[in-house]
Amino acid sequence: MANTDVIVTEKITKVYAGNGVPVEALRGVDLTIQQGEFTALVGPSGSGKTTLLNIISGLDAPTDGKVWLSGKLLSGMSGNELSDFRRDNIGFIFQAYNLIPVLTVEENVEYIMLLQRVSKAERHRRVAAMLEEVGLAGFADRNPPQLSGGQQQRVAIARAMVSEPAIILADEPTANLDSRTGADLLDMMSHLNVQTNMIFVFSTHDPMVMERATRLITLKDGQVESDETKG
Amino acid sequence: MMTLKIAFRNIFRQKRRTILTALAMIVGFTLSSIFIGWSDGAYSDIIAMFTQNRIGHIQVHRGDYLDKPSIYKTMDDYESIGETIGSVKGVEAWTPRVYSAGLGSVGEKSTAVQIIGIDVEREVQATRFDKKIIDGRKIAAQPAHEAVLGKGLARNLSAMVGDEIVIVSQGADGSIANDLYKIVGIAESGDDIADRMACYLHIADAQELLVLEGRSHEVVVIVSNINRVLKITEAIETSLNDSTLDVAPWQVVAKDFYRAMQADQQGDAIGRIIIMLIVAIGVLNTVLMSVLERTSEYGVLKAVGTKPGQIFWLVICEVLIIAVGSIVVGAVLGTAANHLLSIYGITMPQEFTYGGIKFQTMYAEVNARSLIIPAITVILSAGLVSIFPALKAARILPARAMRAH
């Protein structure tokens, strides 16, 4: 494992016991993703993109195989250790934004830093800078339901990136957005990727994401069908 | 802090459900509070009547007189014993009594009587003897061969104020004791059974009849605060420092009555438990619904690094915040209801007797118990029933929970 290998999976399989009939979602996936990659996991529905993303992030456990993130083996971690690891190393962007509706934009972005016990002054500084970065400087006191889909996804991006994790995992981040907003957000994420050198891994069907990705991993029937790095 | 903030704001997301949950807790608290206030008020009245009118709060006897009464088990120096008791802090009054059984005859009628020799002035001070007189007057302060009959005894003997009663008994020296007394009053103590036999004489007259000069069988003590009766009993024992004397609080003197009352109170506790069970089921239902609705949200919180324990406390906090608010509202309602019931009471259509004492109007009591017990019960029942939904939320698998969105 090279020093720059941030995500490493080894023979990952995942079997769901759906209605008594086992369904193989992943079948021996080996993958290595390095620092600064802007990667898209693509493939038809049911190919295992989201399952792989969930397993990489520790949100779900593989039936077999191993996952290392930043050199740490996820399968040996307890529930609390996994929570701490996700908090400190992974930022999530979801298709449905998944913001906490009772918290304001500022509080949503601040939340992970509160879990990390970052000082108040530092939290405020970073939140202000991040909201500025995603173009929501004047929206700090709004609640998520008062924002458009694109604005909510920007908040989700800010929340994912504010604690400066090594990896950003995005599950169909543009699926609920119009193409203009989606393109704007992708440009922003691409810019942040270059600026911060964070890993971005997308699960997507969106051609705009595929166009911007520096690496395209195609899954089919739970296996890596192709792995293409753009020049 | 953020957990509290989220919990507090979550409460206002589903106002109707929060109101329903709070209502279940408020109604449970208020009912429980009234239940306790009412029960305590009724028992306080019963105890006050039972003790103040009859047996006093503490009694002092020679040896085992309480269990095996005998004319010979007397206190020879009851005046000095009384003075010692009177000097104990918390003692309001004391009064000596002489007891014996005898036969009372008025005209052609005769019946068994209980001779009760009393120090009239002290008895008025201690047990408000004068308030029990329903016809005629109380016995004179100085011995004058006067008698006051209990209402039931007077009826049995067809005796009226102004008649004379002949009492026959046995003196402590073995002689036949008999004498004639003028009936100056009829008394009603509220205790029907006692009133059917009670024949009150001046203590000096009773001592003369029973050949018990200067001696008494009992010293009855009234304390200023009945809740301190056990401590004052100990203090009297210490002050008297006489192992031949038995100092007993009313709970020992009237142990059958006290046990019956405790059994009744345990019955009341079952009623309170049933109320709180109904509340708990209501709370469990709404909290479970709330957790189920927010499964996806808990999944997100876990995904971004919130620990299972923090999610657990988030759910518990929400319920406890509603519980605390409900307790405040319930306390206001319960106290107001108990206050009104303590002033106006509820008059029963018919008199009823408890421990031989008649009651018709029952009053509630405003006390700390009627707030503390329901508060603890609401907090505990709400907290306990929330544990299951909170664990459910804490154990949510983020990937599966977010798919439920």
Image: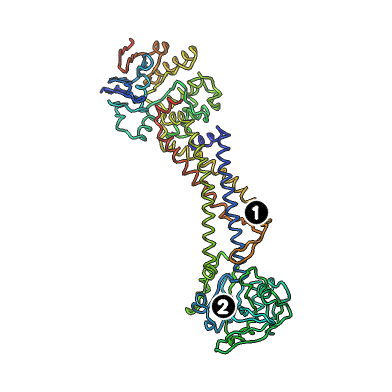
CA separation in Å, label 1 and label 2: 38 Å
How many numbered discs, if any?
A: 2
Sequence-first tag of 1 and 2: 2
Do discs 1 and 2 share a chain? yes
**Residue A230 position within the rendered picture, expressed as x and y whole percent measured from the top left:** 33, 10
**Residue B151 position within the rendered picture, expressed as x and y whole percent measured from the top left:** 67, 72
Chain hosting mark 2: B
Q: Residue at x 56, y 71 (%)?
A: B58
Q: Which mark is residue B216?
A: none
In this rendering, the answer to whether B266 lies above or below A172 is below
Label 1 or label 2, whichever lies nearer to me, is 2
Q: Is residue B181 visible?
A: yes
Q: Quadrant of residue A166?
A: top left
In this rendering, the answer to whether B342 lies above or below A76 is below
Chain hosting mark 1: B
Helix, strand or loop at label 1? It is: helix
Closest to the observer, A141 or A92: A92
Q: Residue at x 47, y 37 (%)?
A: B314
- Mark 2, Cα crowd under 10 Å, few <14 / some 14-19 / many 20+, is many
Q: Which mark is residue B339?
A: 1
Closest to the observer, B242 or B206: B206
Left or right: where B199 falls relative to B69: right
In this rendering, the answer to whether A195 lies above or below B104 is above
Closest to the observer, A19 or A89: A19
Q: Which mark is residue B218?
A: 2
* Residue lying at the far left of the rendered structure: A1
Left or right: where B367 falls relative to A205: right
Three-letter code for the amino acid on which mark 1 is drawn: His
Q: Quadrant of residue B37?
A: bottom right
In this rendering, the answer to whether A42 lies above or below B404 is above
Q: Is residue A112 visible?
A: no
Left or right: where A219 falls relative to B204: left
